[in-house]
Image (spheres, rainbow, N blue to C red):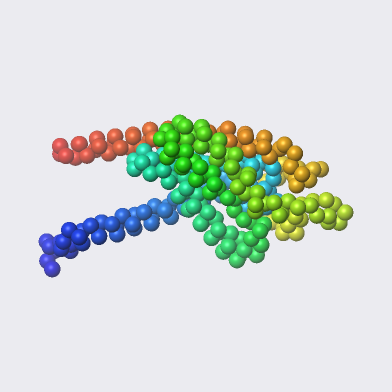
Amino acid sequence: MSASQSAVRSRAEAVKASRTFDWLILFTLFFVVLGGYHIHYMLTGGDWDFWSDWKDRRLWVTVAPIVSITFPAAVQACLWWRYRLPIGATISVVALMIGEWINRYFNFWGWTYFPVNICWPSNLIPGAIVLDVILMLGNSMTLTAVIGGLAYGLLFYPGNWPNLAPLHLPVEYNGMMMTLADLQGYHYVRTGTPEYIRMVEKGTLRTFGKDVAPVSAFFSAFIATFPPHDRVIRASQFVMHIRLHLLHILSKG
């Protein structure tokens, strides 16, 4: 075959090659989202997502939904504005969960021998599904930002309670009442953590609840109603305008 001849000999082969190329692009983009979202959440969520004794009723319920909604909101806005696909938040969170569990299994457990039930990642999938469903049914970014953001923040604590509840059972250790999560944190010493930003609920048993978790959940739900949907759309429109302008200049040249 000469250099001037095409490797594709029929329309069917061209379609097959195009679809294979599309799948390679989608596969690559999935892992780009996985890596970017994972790094973002590790840097912003940090210890509240790493350790079970940091998963308290106040800051964990407040911090995790606020810092975790920005990346899904951006991907959701891009996929909805360009392709009308209401799956951006779910795909982002599923990618994050895959990366988080790989990290927990091979790094936290396989390398440093922390048990998985002290370093399990927070579950964000229920809120992401509701975020996409509201966008699909409402067909509005504003409605998704307000109602979907509220639902995302409010569903965070109930969605994680099945994993967290066994670790919040009360135990007595050396005459002190604490939770199993606190006892794990006592026995598994870690590197220096920024205690100046950690509010430990001393004197109260987190098992008994009170009204702290609902207040924190409602606050995070309120803050989560301000994701960057509109800013992402404006940025995408600006990039598209620049591309069209450059194509116009090149076509004239």
Is residue 240 shown above or below 163? above
Name the one closer to the observer, 253 or 126. Answer: 126
Q: Outermost residue, right direction?
A: 175
Name the one closer to the observer, 55 or 243. Answer: 55
Q: Position of residue 55 (x, y in %)?
A: 67, 48
Q: Position of residue 216 (x, y in %)?
A: 66, 37
Whether residue 224 is visible to the viewer of this picture, yes or no, is no
Q: Position of residue 79 (x, y in %)?
A: 38, 43
Tell me which corner region of the image, top left, top right, bottom left or bottom right, holds residue 189.
bottom right
Whether residue 244 is visible to the viewer of this picture, yes or no, is yes
- Residue found at x 12% / y 62%: 5
Tell me which corner region of the image, top left, top right, bottom left or bottom right, holds residue 11.
bottom left
Q: Position of residue 220 (x, y in %)?
A: 60, 36
- Residue found at x 49% / y 41%: 131
How many labels sit on residues?
0
Name the one closer to the observer, 43 or 210. Answer: 210
- Residue found at x 52% / y 34%: 147
Image side of residue 170 versus residue 45, left or right: right
- Residue found at x 55% / y 35%: 150
Is residue 162 shown above or below 130? below
Q: Quadrant of the C terminus?
A: top left
Name the one closer to the observer, 210 or 121. Answer: 210
Tell me which corner region of the image, top left, top right, bottom left or bottom right, holds residue 250.
top left
